[in-house]
Image: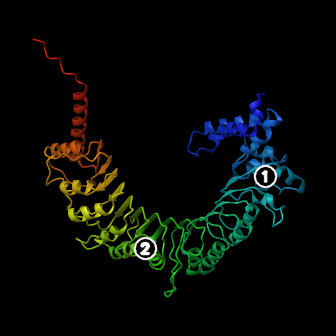
Amino acid sequence: MHQALLVPEILLDIFDHVNESVDLPSDDPPCERLLSLQSLASLATTCKTFHEPAMDLLWANIDELEPLLGCVTRLHPMIYSSSAGPSWSEGVEPLSEHETHQFLRHATRVRSIDIISDKNFHLLTVFPTETCIFPRLQSLLWQVKAPNNIYLHLFLSDTLLFTYLRAIHPASKYIGTRCASLEALTIGDAPEDLTTDESFLLAETIRSCTQLTHLGCPPLEWEAWNYLSNLPTLLKLEIGNGSQPLDRHDLIFAPFLNVTILNFYVHTASYTITALQRSEFPSLLQFEMHVQVMPLAQAEQLFRALSRCNTCHTLEHIVIFSFDPDGDSDEEPVGNSLTAITQFLHFTQLRTLGLVFENYPVYLDNDLLLEAMSSWPHIRYMTLANHQLRPPTITFRGLFDGLRLCPHLDSLQLHIDAVNIDIDPETESFQHTTLQKFNVGFSNVEDVEAIARIIFSMLPRVEKVRHGNEDEWIQVNEHLEYLKSSAVLDRHITPEPTPVT
């Protein structure tokens, strides 16, 4: 054996490289993952020096309990026989006390486990209630349905850092006390609004976690929200679906001093608006909201609340997406449009702005676009989608006046007046050399050659205009491709030398 392999750091680096395919996403080719596992297994049987580090990596990440149950002599043929099916453990006796030693042989090596099914839990009844069978576990994905959540305690290690729970349930109240180092907790959306007992249990669970940096959960009642506002470790907060009200009208929460990411994935905007109106986020960098039902009046309220919760000097990323797949939103009167874009002019550090509303457009004209672009000198991505097909109020002249003020913009979606052309690329020297993705949505176009020349001359890095599948824009892109290919050809033609006389 080469002497370098006796150096633990070098050996671990080599094994980590072998292990890379094991940690690939599950949609990667399974043969690569299998090859890495087989390589680690071979290394573990090569020599004593290789055995421990290879086995640690081999068992670090497992799905379900079968790999450990397969170490039990009695169960091995049931699991790995050619006739074994998903229900192989039905009617099988629980582990004996002697067999627990076989089952636990490699449990201390497990760092991450994904539990989807509860079909094998009855085999574990031999373990006492207070037992943790994975003493070095760091990541737990618990996707088990009730009622077998009573076995959750077997997985609650004091080394646990990340936990995903499919839903809130009584066993979750042990998380904060048994997993004192827990940093990230995600609780899946409830299929229906939480009951009073479930809401209390959720709040109790969260208040028991004192080191959280990342929390994702259904809407919280006011006491839990108040607790989080005073939790200095919290950096990322994500709120899922539900309609739990923040019903203390007299309550103003302490500032969320260190939260940098705030996301809402909700059915209506009411909870979000109330939370923003009563809170401050002086360190916030990212705000995202995906909402199904949000009337125009609520959108105006939301924009106003977001601009007043002490985020104007820090917020860099705003994405608000409203799309109602179930048709629960009331139709807005024809002609209504969202004019509250001016509320965002205060966000001077903005890099990303995405506003997509199904039932009404965001109003923007040349003057307002110019004011916005002058307020956002760092903007890189901007989407203002218009699903209502209202007549555009921004011209090419207004667009390029705004682009002059945003040298870093590389992605833009905007409804534009491409019929009434008010600019001549032959007389303009300006080029925006950063913009690469340009989406005009369902904008109409008539003079396809003129539009192609404008884009070719003034937006040289745009290879293709994205659009709503209008035939005319397909022609614009064809002509744009022709102009670009002709320019390349011209650059490669060497002029003939002038004859010497």
Q: Is residue 132 above or below residue 489?
A: below
Q: Is residue 178 above or below residue 492?
A: below
Left of 151 or right of it: where is 400? left
Q: Residue furthest top?
A: 501
Callout 2: SS: loop
Determine if residue 448 is in view. Answer: yes
How far across and how far down the image is residue 223, in percent? 59, 81
Instruction: Indicate which label's residue lies in the foreground, 1 or 2.
Output: 1
Amino acid on which disc 1 is placed:
Thr
How far across and how far down the image is residue 52, in percent? 79, 42
Between residue 469 and residue 400, name the one nearer to us. Answer: 400
Which residue is found at the position 60% from the left and 81% from the top?
A: 196
Callout 1: SS: helix
Left of 488 or right of it: where is 95? right
Between residue 104 and residue 351, name the one nearer to us. Answer: 351
Would you call the spot at circle 2 few (<14 residues within 10 Å), some (14-19), or many (20 or more)? many
Which residue is found at the position 83% from the left and 62% from the top?
A: 127
Q: Which mark is residue 108?
A: 1
Q: Residue furthest front?
A: 501
Q: Which residue is mark 2?
A: 269
Would you call the spot at circle 1 few (<14 residues within 10 Å), some (14-19), or many (20 or more)? some
| Image quadrant occupied by the C terminus | top left
Disc nearer the start of the sequence (1/2): 1
How far across and how far down the image is residue 38, in percent? 70, 36
Which residue is found at the position 22% from the left and 35% from the top?
A: 482
Amino acid on which disc 2 is placed:
Ala
Between residue 249 and residue 199, name the one nearer to us. Answer: 249
Determine if residue 386 is in view. Answer: no
